[in-house]
């Protein structure tokens, strides 16, 4: 069974995304929301770790509205952009949710 | 300031607002309002929950009260039924009230 | 009974988050729920000894942590790498029995619980 991790802090200011990437388990998913969406940028200090997590088979999502609000649409890592309906579906599909804030 | 004749300030549930207002005479009045006549056995538990509060800065809910009594006074007294005999019908609530402590959280 | 894990990741006095986590644990325990507490990231600062909160204004989180056992919470877990990263001396803590976990053990702990409370 798996966990959906949501992260809402910018990795440029805060260690939260790094902690999440370090402790997520195979089969989990990660969703970047609010300022967490800055973690989708290739320039983020967490990019190497994020790519290694993706290589382990963990899917990283980002909430489209939060990316758009911040004007983030280019130079992004290999993440999947989702809407609120998918957010709800992911919440139901995982056994637990850990919100990193 | 409260003068010596008036009862100290209490909250809506009848618990003292300030622990520094507590003294044995106040305790007897608080107990009387709950129809409890304080004996040496009552005072032993009252002093115990005050010690609990000094140690943990919390008023004990039911299970914590039983555990602590068990640890400090042994198995004969560390039982719900013993505490119920002294502070019926709600030992955790009444002993904190009479001891001048805040109402225990999550306790009904 | 479903198992609950409270994950507390914030330091004790800067915000109310650590206190709210502890109060959630105490509430669950009072209702005889099966709940454990995991401290990680800045949450491990809650374990620092010699906390002296401002009298009459702040309540001592350290003293409340020590009450967990009395309230029926038998195990406090803490993430060892978080403590190491912060230079927290594990010989100078406010509570005696802590179960230290590495990254893998934290992953297992999370997956072994039915519900998470994130603080």
Image (spheres, coloured by chain):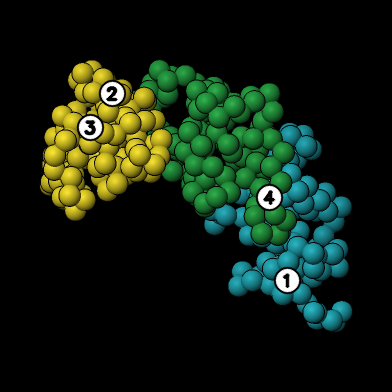
Q: Is residue C42 visible?
A: yes
Tell me which residue sits at (31%, 40%) in the image. A7
State how far apart marks 1 and 4 are (Cα).
36 Å
Tag 4: Cα neighbours inside 10 Å, few (<14), some, or many (≥20)? Answer: some
Residue A43, image x and y in percent? 26, 33
Chain B representation colour: cyan
3 and 1 marks on the same chain: no
Towards the viewer: A11 or A87: A11
Chain A representation colour: yellow
* Front disc: 1 or 4: 4
Towards the viewer: A35 or B8: A35
* Front disc: 2 or 1: 2
Provide the residue designation for mark 1. Answer: B33
Label 4 element class: loop
Provide the residue designation for mark 2. Answer: A48
Q: Is residue C39 left or right of residue B34?
A: left
Q: Quadrant of residue B8?
A: bottom right
Provide the residue designation for mark 3. Answer: A42
Residue C90, image x and y in percent? 64, 24
Judge whether B80 appears above or below A94 on screen.
below
Mark 4 in CB contact with mark 2 (< 8 angstroms): no
Provide the residue designation for mark 4. Answer: C53
State how far apart marks 3 and 2 are (Cα).
9 Å
Q: Is residue B17 left or right of residue A33?
A: right
């Amino acid at each position: 069974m798996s966990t959906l991790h949501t992260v809402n802090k910018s990795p440029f200011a805060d260690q939260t995304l790094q902690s999440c990437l370090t402790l997520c388990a195979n089969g989990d998913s990660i969703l970047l929301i609010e300022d967490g969406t800055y973690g989708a940028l290739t320039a983020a200090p967490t990019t190497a770790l994020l790519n290694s997590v993706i290589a382990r088979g963990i899917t990283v999502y980002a909430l489209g509205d939060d990316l758009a609000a911040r004007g983030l649409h280019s130079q992004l890592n290999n993440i999947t952009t989702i809407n609120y309906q998918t957010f709800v579906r992911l919440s139901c599909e995982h056994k637990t949710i850990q919100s990193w804030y | 300031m409260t003068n010596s004749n008036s009862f100290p300030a209490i909250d809506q549930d009848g618990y003292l607002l300030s622990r520094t207002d507590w003294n044995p005479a106040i305790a007897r009045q608080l107990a009387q309002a709950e129809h409890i006549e304080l004996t040496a056995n009552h005072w032993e538990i009252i002093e115990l929950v005050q010690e609990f509060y000094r140690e943990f800065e919390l008023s004990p809910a039911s299970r914590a009260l039983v555990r602590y009594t068990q640890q400090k006074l042994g198995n004969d007294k560390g039982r719900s039924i013993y505490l119920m005999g002294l502070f019926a019908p709600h030992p955790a609530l009444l002993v904190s009230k009479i001891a001048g402590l805040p109402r225990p959280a999550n306790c009904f | 009974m479903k198992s609950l894990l409270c994950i507390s990741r914030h330091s004790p006095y800067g915000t109310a988050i650590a206190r709210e986590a502890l109060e959630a644990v105490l509430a669950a325990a009072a209702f005889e729920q099966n709940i454990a507490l995991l401290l990680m990231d800045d949450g491990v600062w809650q374990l620092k000894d010699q906390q002296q909160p401002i009298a009459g204004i702040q309540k001592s989180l350290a003293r409340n942590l020590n009450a967990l056992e009395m309230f029926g919470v038998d195990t406090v877990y803490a993430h060892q790498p978080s403590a190491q990263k912060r230079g927290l001396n594990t010989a100078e803590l406010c509570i005696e029995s802590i179960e230290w976990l590495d990254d893998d053990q934290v992953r297992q702990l999370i997956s072994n619980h039915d519900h998470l409370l994130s603080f």
